[in-house]
Image (cartoon, rainbow, N blue to C red):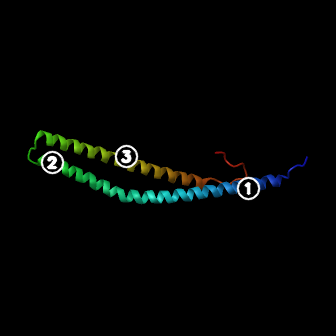
Amino acid sequence: MRQRKPSDDVSARLDALGQRLSELENRTASFRKELRAHGRDLARIGPQVAALEQRVESLRQHSEQQMPAADGEREQARSLLELVRREHEQVRIRVFAAARYEERLSRLEDELGALPVTGGQAPKN
């Protein structure tokens, strides 16, 4: 039975760690691209959401100042306004979720960047 040299184990571990590090760097680069794309989307969507909020409020105030409409028309306008408010709230929630996702990716990148490369065994998934 042939015994391995300790240097063979170290070399194999270093190769495995190098390969794992390379894979993590590739994944991190991919996450960074996604993060930049999400950041651009959020920067573009944020002002649009604020403008929509302002328009909805303006329309609400304007509709309250208008001459009284028939009850059926008023009810239809209220239900439409409620639908717009719900959709607007869903957009707001999605933007918030995207911002949280972006923050989590940033923290993950920071953690991966802070991991030391040691001669120990590679972490398990």
**Who's the residue at 73% across and 55% down the image?**
14
In this rendering, position of residue 47 left or right of residue 81: right
In this rendering, position of residue 88 left or right of residue 33: left
Q: Residue type at mark 3?
A: Ile
Q: Residue type at mark 1?
A: Leu
Check the image and report above or below for 65 versus 44.
above
Residue 114, image quadrant: bottom right
Which disc number belongs to residue 93? Answer: 3
Which disc number belongs to residue 14? Answer: 1
Residue 118, position in %: x, y? 70, 53
Q: CA distance from mark 2 to mark 1?
A: 70 Å
Sequence-first disc among 1 and 3:
1
Q: CA distance from mark 3 to mark 2?
A: 26 Å
Sequence-first disc among 3 and 2:
2
Q: Secondary structure at mark 3?
A: helix
Q: Which residue is at the far front? A: 72
In this rendering, position of residue 33 left or right of residue 8: left
**Who's the residue at 22% across and 49% down the image?**
57
Residue 61, position in %: x, y? 17, 48
Q: CA distance from mark 1 to mark 3?
A: 45 Å
Q: Secondary structure at mark 1?
A: helix
Residue wearing tag 2: 63
